[in-house]
Amino acid sequence: MKLKTLLLFVALCCSSFFLKAQDKSWKEHNRWIWGPSVGYQYQSGNFLKVSGWGLFAPNDFQYMKIDAGANFSWMDNKTTVIPEVGFTYYLNDFVLFPFVKAELTPYTITPKVGASLFSIVDLGIGYGFDYNTKKNFKPIDGLTVSVGVNIPLNFHLY
């Protein structure tokens, strides 16, 4: 009987130590998750999208992602690289996250809506507005569809 009581006491002490350790690590970690992403987009042509991103949670049910990268395309027998910045607002924290997104390049602004699986795989649809046509390049405007994979490098569970 004393052995069972002693084991129970040791187990409770260890579990409270474990909970304190988890609490301390939460305060020590920064709340940003970041990493690279790669994707495909069709918007008046095919584009390979490569970027770096950072995601943070302003509360328990919403997430915001900021990304910067480049779109690569092969048109008119030459490679074209177009820089891009984007902002994504995820509306939920369940398995399927609906989102709204805005992407800005030196030539277009593209609002999108879509869904994301755990904010790792993004599927989006939108419309691009051309405001500055690139020299020796066709206008990049109209309906756009995209798929992207975000790879979190510092993801942690709490």
Image (spheres, grey):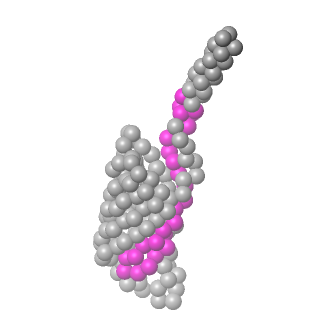
Which residue is found at the position 37% from the left and 80% from the top? 44
Magenta stretch bounds: 23-49
Q: Looking at the image, which is closer to me, 34 or 135?
A: 34
Which quadrant is home to the N terminus?
top right
Give x and y (percent) for residue 37: 52, 62
Q: Residue at x 55, y 37 (%)?
A: 29
Q: Residue furthest bottom?
A: 77
For residue 38: magenta?
yes
Q: State whether residue 48 is above or below residue 51.
A: below
Taking the view exactly as shown, the residue that stands out farthest to the right is 3
Determine if residue 131 is in view: no
> In which image quadrant can residue 132 be found?
bottom left
* Residue under the point 35% across and 73% down: 144
Q: Is residue 82 above or below residue 27?
A: below
Q: Quadrant of residue 108?
A: bottom left
Closer to us: 9 or 128? 9
Residue 55 in view = yes
Q: Nearer the viewer, residue 80 or 45?
A: 45
Would you say 158 lies left or right of 131 here?
right
Q: Is residue 30 magenta?
A: yes
Q: Nearer the viewer, residue 4 or 34?
A: 4
Residue 136 position, x and y percent, is: 42, 86
| Residue 54 picture location, percent across and down | 49, 51
